[in-house]
Image: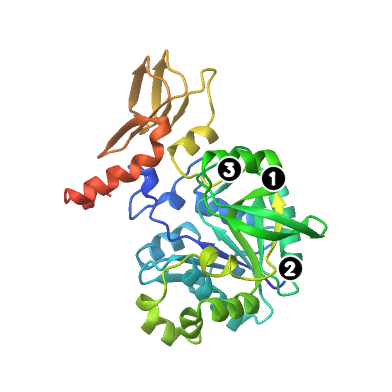
Amino acid sequence: MDHAWAIVLAGGSGTRFWPLSRRARPKQFLPLAGSSSLLARTLERMAPLIPPERVIVVTSAALLGASRAELPAVPAENFLGEPSARNTAAAVGWAAATVHRRDPDARLVVLAADQHITDPDGYLAVCGRALEACDAGTLVTVGITPTRPETGYGWLELGAERGRGVFEVARFVEKPDRARAEAFLAGGRHLWNGGQFFFRADAILDAIRQHLPVLGAALASDAQLADRWNALPSISIDHGVMERAAGVLTVPGAFGWSDVGSWTSAWELGDHDEFGNVSEGSDAVLVDCRGTYVHGRPGKTIAVIGLDDLVIVDTEDALLVMPRDRAQDVRAITAELERRGLGSRL
């Protein structure tokens, strides 16, 4: 696949994994669900299809140095540092324009830097089908075969089959309530929208010019983009382009995907003992505990007695303790730290 390029979106702040993730070391740099970082494993998975010289990493200007250090095989000029966060449409557009100037025939794979996949071979097979499906200029997304009635993800509805394992997207669906999610799961015609996209560089640039003309005009040159960056629309590539474009296709896949969206995800992906407990990084001693997750520092013993379904995360300057089913509420802690003027701890 000589013209296949990967665009890795690596600008996230990672607040849901505080206190282990910080502004200077967000989630994609953490070794969650493995020994290497989520960012490094993203490139490792794609290596059989796309070599590091055809990888573009879009991150924040503040994380350029850390990103380059994490991915030494990727050429330095392939890292794009955003002056400010403008969501994924601007990031994808900038990367697509950069690649198109180098390779007018480029086909792009857009990936998040902070996801986890347990079946890399199955994943590569899906990616291969999606790259073939975008050859004609079509915008393509990978739909994740759902395993539960998830209300925290966007979904998409399958339309007619257009080739082996390739379907039309009948419509995109915003995050549903529990009843709709259960109906989607039971009906078998809906998939999770995992935010992984495949398209020719010229096709996505045309679509951006059509649906996001302010961004499209700014992408004409790097100088214009730099001058206009802070005035660009802050919108996702999903809402800004994919959901508005005609004829979008999807390739369904079941390859053990997780967005690693919270400490609950870390517990789900960890090595469980006979009582469903997970311990990482520390010498944890759990007595009469079930379903509890502990992440600590090497050489420090964390002892827990008689507590179920907790998350305990201990770092040098912070300790987090919460029920596992409230993992999404970590953002409330980071917001409170900001309110108290303690932003230096984020």
Residue 141, compared with residue 300, is above or below; it is below
Q: Where is residue 38 in the image (x, y as percent from the top left)?
A: 51, 49
The residue located at (52%, 64%) in the rendering is: 239
The residue that mark 3 highlights is 180
The residue located at (47%, 57%) in the rendering is: 70
Task: Assess whether mark 1 and mark 2 are in contact (beta carbons under 8 angstroms).
Answer: no
Q: How far apart are marks 2 and 3 (CA)?
A: 40 Å
How packed mark 3 is, by other alpha carbons closer than 10 Å (few <14, some 14-19, many 20 or more), is some
The type of residue carrying mark 3 is: Arg
Residue 114, compared with residue 270, is above or below; it is below
Report helix, strand or loop for mark 1.
loop
How packed mark 2 is, by other alpha carbons closer than 10 Å (few <14, some 14-19, many 20 or more), is few
Report helix, strand or loop for mark 2.
loop
Left or right: residue 268 compared with residue 119: left
Q: Where is residue 109 in the image (x, y as percent from the top left)?
A: 63, 64
The residue that mark 1 highlights is 254
Tell me the mark number nearer the camera, choosing from 1 and 3.
3
Left or right: residue 59 compared with residue 208: left
Q: Please tell me the numbered disc located at residue 1.
A: 2
How packed mark 1 is, by other alpha carbons closer than 10 Å (few <14, some 14-19, many 20 or more), is some
Report helix, strand or loop for mark 3.
helix
